[in-house]
Amino acid sequence: MERRRTVYDITQGSLNRNIWDLAWPTMLSQLVFMIPNLYDAVWLGKVGSGAQAAAGLATSVRVTMISVLMALSGASGAVVARYVGAKDQENANLATLQGVILMFVASGSLGLIGFVFAEPLMRLAGADSDVLPLAVRYARVLFAGLIAMEMVPSVGGMMSTVGAPQVRLTMMLWTTGVVLVAEPLLVNWLGLEGAVLALVGAHVVGTVWGIGELLAGRASVRIDLHNLRLDFSMMGRILRITWPGIFQRGIPNFGMTVLTRLISGYGSATLDAWVVASRVFSFAQVPGMGVSRVSAAMVGQNLGAKQPKRAEDSVRVIALTVAVTTGLILGGLMLFAPAVMTLFSDDAESIAIGARIICVLSIGYLAQGVTWVFDAALGGAGDTVSPMMINAVLWLIQIPFAYIFSKVFGMGANGLWLAMNIGWLVQLGMIQWRYQQGAWKLKQI
């Protein structure tokens, strides 16, 4: 017997209850999503010197390249959410299918490029002669499995925007369960390649399960094999929202790759510390990130139901929740920064540098967390141009300041952390100003 679908109607009823119904599975899925990254960091620390840096460089290049997938996920979710909010099930299902097809083609194409050009890409990322061979080995396996690695967050993100966060949650539960079992076995057997093979294999399992759920119709939308076709009109609607989203996601992702290259110039200890600290920050932001993503669903569906005031009220509640929870978590992380770093490294220099990074960058990551709320709200409305422009301004500030502070003013790596904070605070001010103008309420998809 077919399992009953879980459907949240977030266009009516208690606003707080609607937000909570979407937030808890989204937060839990984000937590589960981050566990493999931290677990991977622990096992990479056991592989040997340079493994953390190699994985960090490969991942920074991957994140830049997959900006296309991030944009497709958000755009597909925005289109599907409008149809769901308008109670147009047929077009909601059709948009879901076209979104999945676009994600599959994009991830496969990017994976091929990354695999073929792994070595020059790692050189561009800043790999030195010691780290380069390790980074290339890691990157080739990573890009060979990019379809699976990206379909889990991309399809899961689309489903969260649609109001079916349980799909993303269960995809990540499968992925994490496989990683927890497979990584120790494969690292002990294959070393560095074993670590990345465990991640890729686990995401294969998560992808298969998620697509199976859509085929079986166990979410608010489904993939209907009887209606399997390419609909270029629907794809065009998704891609019109996607293209500015590519720049919106790509600009900060590319900027972070440039910063990683600057960081690598201060030695392997600084690079290792940054890789670990950034993963720790990602884990600390899980509650805020999970709640912030609810903005896209609340805005998208309530605009589809012609309720802009309800959409606006939900964003206000979500922003306050994210600011409070993220602030408390980052405050606690600052207090225990050295102890946290010792979980991932035995090197005294890396531990000291990493603890300093955590203390300095916590204010910037708090600003970034609140920024995500307004970013998701605008994206849920179909406005990806405004965040794109704001992200461009962010990196016009952050990259030059990073160079000036670190090189010209002689602040070294500390200048990089200061530039990051300034950039994220400016970004928050700009995106909040754009959101408060209210043009997103009139956006047509």
Image: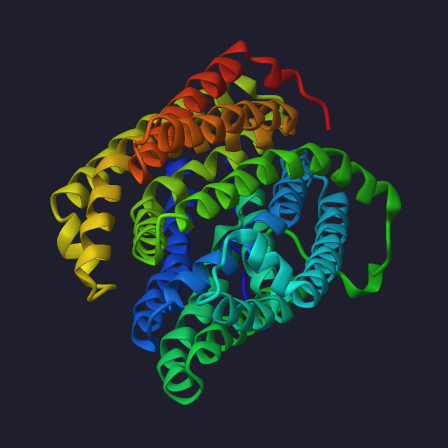
Which residue is located at x 82 percent, y 40 percent? 236
In the rendered image, the vertical position of residue 64 relative to residue 394, given as above or below: below
Q: Is residue 186 visible?
A: yes
Residue 315 locus on image (x, y percent)? 44, 25
Which residue is located at x 41 percent, y 69 percent? 176
Which is more toward the observer, 429 or 293? 429
> Seen in the image, is 198 located left or right of residue 273?
right
Which is more toward the observer, 110 or 412? 412
Q: Quadrant of the C terminus?
A: top right
Q: Quadrant of the N terminus?
A: bottom right
Residue closest to the far bottom: 189
Q: Is residue 219 visible?
A: no
Which is more toward the observer, 316 or 410? 410
Residue 357 locus on image (x, y percent)? 26, 43
Residue 22 locus on image (x, y percent)? 43, 44
In the rendered image, the vertical position of residue 332 relative to residue 366, given as above or below: below
> Seen in the image, is 267 located left or right of residue 348?
right
Residue 199 locus on image (x, y percent)? 48, 71
Please give the count of numbered marks on the rendered protein: 0
Which residue is located at x 61 percent, y 70 percent? 145
